[in-house]
Amino acid sequence: MKHLTHQKTDFMKKMLTAIILGLTVMISSCGSSAADKDSPLEAKKIELSKLKDQQVKLTKQIADLEAELAKLDPSTKAEKAKLVAITTLAPVSFTHYIELQGKIDAENISYIAPRGNPGVVRAIYVKKGFQVKPGQLLLKLDDVVAKQQIANAQTQLGYARDLYQRRKNLWDQKIGAEVDLITAKNNVDQAENQIKILQEQLNFTNVYSDVSGVVDDITIKVGEIFQGGSQLRIVNTNDLKAVVLVPEVYQDRVKVGSPVKISLPELNNKTINATVRIAGKLIDPGNRSFYVEMKIPYEQDLRPNQIAIAKIQDYTAANAITIPVNTLQTDDKGKYVLVAVTENGKMTARKRMLTTGQLYDDKIEIKSGLQAGDQVITDGFQSLYEGQLITTQIN
């Protein structure tokens, strides 16, 4: 009987030696394969994944054989529990964001233009950086022609009034025709209206601001013809917004009222909380995106066209189960994690197949497969196999 037990022990030891040698050859083969620079990268990754699976299986076989040896030969050391770290799961609030680059823009950017015809600049009353208000005088255009036209019209008005008075005096004496009096009165009215028009045209030579803001650019000089457009630009920096183009795939998830965190890289990643105020209804055929904007409060350091990183909330769950994404593993059956369970008074590693949800930062939402109270192995899981003894205590 002792001879038979001895034979079993020798057989088990030979099997253990053969498995270890096989594992060593496979690992060496993996190293030489990785050194082969002529093989495609994806092929190397697939080969490495297969070898790791084989390594896990061989490690389990070794542990099983060691356990058998421990039963057959008490002098054989029992399997040693592997040190791991675990985290007990609890429901948490999970939020997913879409991160997109946008920019700061002004609600009102006014390109000043003359209300009448272009004219030669005779005086400039502001400089770049000046704060202006609506109705403030900015430029004075040449008004010589307009003043001369008014002077001529006033002379005509005086003549028309004199003629009308003469006609009226005759009419009061019952001399002359009524039509002559009416014609004279109409001439006075027309002359007065003409002067009003000319005075308005004279006022057109004064260029006023139509918005409140800062003179952001002024390129016109005295003596040059002012036509408007880019020659004088006023930006209202008190009324700003962030604008972002959102890919059309998110059109059902980004809506008016969606919370947004706006980060400003040039201001030490300062964060501003906002909400989507406008979500465009038109998809741009060029970039397959739609326009959204968020109202943001005034801050002295903000400038139009400044880069803004918008984190738009498109999903949230109040009581979600999440795990670190690096603990998620995959085999031929799907995605899984290793959890710690107590069996026969010992802590053992067990697989849990999972259905996953949204991923954000380093956390992934778990839809099924885990629940509150489960203990997920978060460190030391890389070479564990199903049923392996584990511990959280350092011997």
Image (cartoon, grey):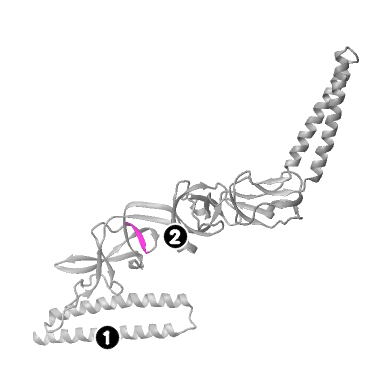
Circle 2 SS class: strand
- Residue drawn at point x = 25 percent, y = 86 percent: 17
Seen as rendered, the residue at the extreme right is 176
Query: Mark 1 — residue?
Result: 18
Residue 102 at what x, y percent from top left? 53, 57
Where 157 falls versus 1 (above or below)? above
Q: Quadrant of residue 343?
A: bottom left
Callout 1 crowding tier (Cα within 10 Å): few <14, some 14–19, many ≥20: few
Where 59 falls versus 228 (above or below)? below
Q: Is residue 76 left or right of residue 21?
A: left
Tell me the number on the disc at residue 273: none
Q: The magenta stretch spans which residues?
A: 362-367
- Residue drawn at point x = 26 percent, y = 60 percent: 89
Q: Is residue 198 left or right of residue 268?
A: right
Quarter of the image for the N terminus: give it: bottom left
Tell me the number on the disc at residue 270: 2
Amino acid type of disc 1? Ala
Residue 332 at what x, y percent from top left? 36, 67
- Residue drawn at point x = 31 percent, y = 83 percent: 23
Q: Quadrant of residue 324?
A: bottom left
Circle 1 SS class: helix
Distance in Å between CA atoms under marks 2 and 1: 61 Å
Foreground of the two, 149 or 210: 149
Foreground of the two, 301 or 274: 301
Residue 44 at what x, y percent from top left? 43, 78
Where 38 falls versus 309 (above or below)? below
Quarter of the image for the C terminus: give it: bottom left
